[in-house]
């Protein structure tokens, strides 16, 4: 099956209370992420995003944007749209059998810290 079948094109709407250049800044941050094929601003608060479901999901992208300090549009229509994207993509990723370990962005953690001791890890950064 062609990998083009698993490409998704989305419009991401950011909150209008931040920087007037936040769409451009968000695009710059997303361009280096594996699986993102295109990230370009439409206007100051909206961006066009093309990515592969084999590497990413909208939920992962949304989480990354929030972690980087970008606020997504929280109006009702935008929330409904994001939930529909997530549902459809979860179903599609399950059908193409994306492994569970591929469903999350990978972070480099200290291998000496056991996963059941998160407090020990975070004390270095407090």
Image (cartoon, rainbow, N blue to C red):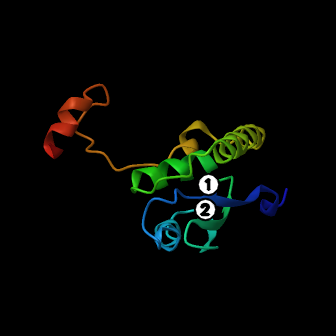
CA–CA distance in space, label 2 to label 1: 5 Å
Left or right for 28, reference 123: right
Residue nearest the viewer, comparing 7 with 47: 47
| Residue 14 image offset from top left, x and y in percent | 55, 58
Where is residue 97? Give x, y as percent. 72, 40
Residue 35 shows which numbered tag? 2
**Which residue in the rendered view is the most extreme toward the right?**
1
Q: Which residue position holds label 1?
A: 55
- Find residue 45 and report its horizontal and vertical position in percent: 56, 66
Q: Is residue 68 above or below residue 93?
A: below
Q: Is mark 1 on a helix, strand or loop?
A: loop
Q: Quadrant of residue 80?
A: top right
Question: The N terminus appears in which quarter of the rendering?
Answer: bottom right
- Rendered position, 52 above or below 101: below
Picture coordinates of residue 114, whole percent (x, y): 27, 31
- Left or right: residue 11 versus residue 31 is right
């Amino acid at each position: 099956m062609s990998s083009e079948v698993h490409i998704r094109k989305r419009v991401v709407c950011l909150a209008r209370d931040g920087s007037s250049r936040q769409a451009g800044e968000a695009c710059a941050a997303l361009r280096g992420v594996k699986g993102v094929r295109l990230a370009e601003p439409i206007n100051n608060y909206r961006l066009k995003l093309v990515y592969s479901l084999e590497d990413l999901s909208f939920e992962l992208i949304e989480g990354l944007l929030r972690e980087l300090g970008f606020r997504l549009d929280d109006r009702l229509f935008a929330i409904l749209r994001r939930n529909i994207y997530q549902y459809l993509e979860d179903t599609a990723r399950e059908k193409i059998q994306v492994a569970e370990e591929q469903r999350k962005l990978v972070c480099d953690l200290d291998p000496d810290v056991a996963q059941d001791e998160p407090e020990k890890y975070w004390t270095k950064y407090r």
